[in-house]
Amino acid sequence: MSVLITNISELVTNAPGEADSVASPGPFEAIADAAIVLDGGLVAWAGLAAEAPAADEVVDAAGRAVLPGFVDSHAHLVFAGERGAEFAARMAGLPYGAGGIRSTVAATRAASDDVLRANLARLAGEMLAQGTTTFECKSGYGLTVADEARAVALAGEVTPEVTYLGAHVVPPEFDGRTAAYIDLVCGEMLAACAPSAKWVDVFCEDGAFGADEARAVLAAGEAAGLQPRIHANQLGPGPGVQVAVEAGAAAADHCTFLSDADVEALAASGGTVATLLPGVEFSTRSPYPDARRLLSAGVTVAIATDCNPGSCFTSSMPLCVALAVREMRMTTAEAVWAATAGGARALRRTDVGHLGVGAQADLIMLDAPSHAYLAYRPGVPLIAGVWRSGGRIV
Ligand SMILES: [Zn+2]
């Protein structure tokens, strides 16, 4: 059954031209006084409302804006426990380090499958209600062969974008034996996780893993059929971005502390997206990455939540868009593009993040006339409707 949504004040398509034949996300594009037709789970037509074809069902948008569903390309959702007290202590002046991850590891190992599954379902539901129709989900709070295999299997129940992050931190039982842990991550643990994952990731940072360790993890993952992505340059300058570009990673995530050489490498990479996670800087009271510097250099920028119980426990892409505009000097169009088409690029997806003909019919309707309201009205629940694969869910 086809659905025509008409009387749309602004239809953000991220699809060039009149959206006749679009195979992948283009630059930010929007059509005023628009309509869109969904059929068979895909976008069948998009253009001026006055020229819209007939359909089986008609939805009147009543002057609201319609956008592609958000693509959140960075989230850690398989965990148990919470760290509200750690957050409160941080806001009272304690610094954020990578060590707090261990408390989540202990809680996650102790949790039943049902507890993890229920937590995952709750967070996935939160995301959907806030307009996120595609999201990535990492392991990384198990850090044993069995617990990491369980994490990627559970993640695969809620998304196809599953990332193996055995190299999140060195678990306590491997204290002082990082090389032995890397052997496990690249060996038995990888073999147990690769069948359930699409991506391999590593936290390349002081206090986590160095450049050679990160290279080894990504290379082993690739040999097992996984595609590389990386946590890089979050807490200070480091080699992560260079490792990402060398490895042909789909994305280097965080990118908070970059040298000129890092920016140049990303711009010249031809395929490594800089994924900025402004919720982390908000939640750790840290300096934001310089999005303008990246955009000016021609780097492809995505925005994602990094939803996790430690450094940033938001699942809200609208919040991240607002932060990107207010705190990282992105325009509203740049931020919305980065949260949709940019996220799709970071996941190497051509079927989401845009509303060109043939795209997956994943879209959101705002209770507002334009995309700018996501930043103009921060904190206000503006998601009036969500469609995924052509079906209305919210
Ligand atoms: Zn992360």
Image (cartoon, grey):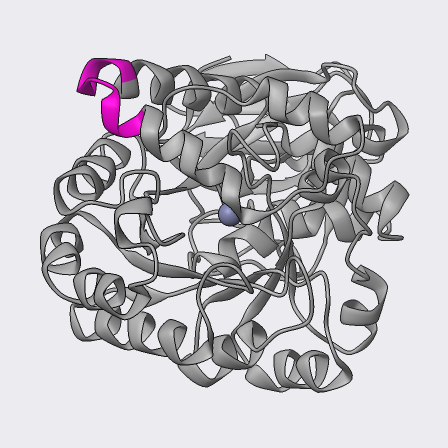
User: How many callouts does the rendering have?
Assistant: 0
Q: Position of residue 372 (x, y in %)?
A: 84, 35
Image quarter where the N terminus lies is top left
Task: Tell me the residue at 65%/47% (across/down).
Answer: 277
Viewed as shown, does residue 364 lie left or right of 163?
A: right
Q: Position of residue 16 (x, y in %)?
A: 65, 60
Figure check: 64 above or below 271:
above
Q: Is residue 114 magenta?
A: yes
Viewed as shown, does residue 67 lie left or right of 53?
A: right
Figure check: 25 above or below 127:
below
- Give 80 or 326, whichever is nearer the viewer: 80
Figure check: 336 above or below 85:
below
- Give 325 or 77, whichever is nearer the viewer: 77
Task: Tell me the residue at 71%/21% (across/down).
Answer: 88
- Give 310 or 331, whichever is nearer the viewer: 310
Give the main secondary structure of the magenta stretch. helix
Can residue 73 be seen here? The reply is no
- Give 291 or 350, whichever is nearer the viewer: 291
Task: Tell me the residue at 42%/56% (across/down).
Answer: 349
Q: Position of residue 176 (x, y in %)?
A: 34, 61
Q: Position of residue 95 (x, y in %)?
A: 72, 42
Image quadrant in which you'd find residue 65: top right
The stretch in magenta equals 108-115
Can residue 373 be seen here? The reply is yes
Residue that protrudes farthest toward the front in the picture: 176
Q: Is residue 66 magenta?
A: no
